[in-house]
Amino acid sequence: MKNSIKQLNKRVFKTGAILLAVLAVVSFIYNDADAKFLWFGKEKSPREMKADKAVKKLNDLNSAERGKAADELIRLDRKRGLIEIKTALKKEKNSRAKRNMINTLGNSGRADAVPAVKEHLNSSDKGVRLYAACALAMLGDDSGIDELRSVISNAKESRGRRSFAIRSLGGIKTDAAADTLVAVLDDGDFAIRLQAVVSLGRIGTAQALLAVRGMTSDKDERVRNAAENILMRTEK
């Protein structure tokens, strides 16, 4: 009887071990986009197949779908996404889709995306120019700082465009970027001052943090709190 129980336990143990091994392999195949395993008779992993679909969507007739496809592709395969988006961007005519693709390149974190974005700094479309300048700033490139400065300093620009430019400028860790932000710390719109403080905190140079310290006495509590929180983090 004891021998029978031992044999049964061994079988259960072996079966469990086999199941765990199978699950591990399946999980690896599913999550590794570069793995060239057979997946239910297919030579590509699910992630690679999704990336293929995203590439097709870059040529979709719907401009909104083209823009969303860029985000999806860069998430699935950053290296391939950069190549495909740069190619699609050259022939893209729709302003909205073009802005989305440029923004995706800015969020990619890849320095080799800079040349493709720079091409749009001189666009006749002011929306495309701003997105290009912001994308470059997010990549740590200051080529578009003049465009950002012109938007940020223009009180007639919408809050959304100014805030976008200010937020992106935080990616450029230079005193020139800090100077541009310091110039709007007395702006009448608290949201502009608040975003400028946050971006100065991201820049983090001595000059930028000195400006942040000065905002601890701002008339708006939200701005004061943001400045104090930044100083608490940086002075630890």
Image (tube, rainbow, N blue to C red):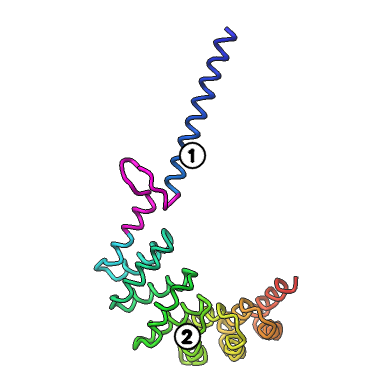
Q: Nearer the viewer, residue 173 or 158?
A: 173
Dividing the picture into quadrants, the one containing residue 97 is bottom left
Residue at 71% across / 76% down in the picture? Answer: 231
Residue 24, numbered label: 1
Residue 111, above or below 15: below
Q: Nearer the viewer, residue 227 or 181?
A: 181
Residue 217 makes an appearance in the image = no
- Mark 2 to mark 1: distance in Å? 47 Å
Left or right of 132 on screen, residue 142: right
Q: Which amino acid lies under the numbered mark 1 shown in the image of this protein?
A: Ala
Residue 85 makes an appearance in the image = yes
Q: Which image quarter holds the C terminus?
A: bottom right
Residue 91, above or below 7: below
| Magenta-drawn stretch contains 46 | yes
Q: State which region is magenta.
A: 32-53
- Judging by the rendered image, the residue that carries numbered circle 2 is 144
Q: Which amino acid lies under the numbered mark 2 shown in the image of this protein?
A: Gly
Dividing the picture into quadrants, the one containing residue 63 is bottom left
Residue at 57% across / 7% down in the picture? Answer: 1
Q: Residue 19 in the image: state x and y as whole percent.
A: 47, 31
Chief secondary structure of the magenta portion:
loop
Q: Residue furthest right?
A: 236
Left or right of 163 on screen, residue 35: left
Dividing the picture into quadrants, the one containing residue 112 is bottom left
Q: Residue 87 in the image: state x and y as whole percent.
A: 32, 71
Graded by Cα atoms within 10 Å as few (under 14), some (14 to 19) or many (20 or more), the crowding at tag 2 reads many
Helix, strand or loop status at disc 2:
loop
Q: Residue 102 in the image: state x and y as whole percent.
A: 40, 75
Residue at 66% across / 81% down in the picture? Answer: 205
Q: Nearer the viewer, residue 81 or 150?
A: 81
Helix, strand or loop status at disc 1:
helix
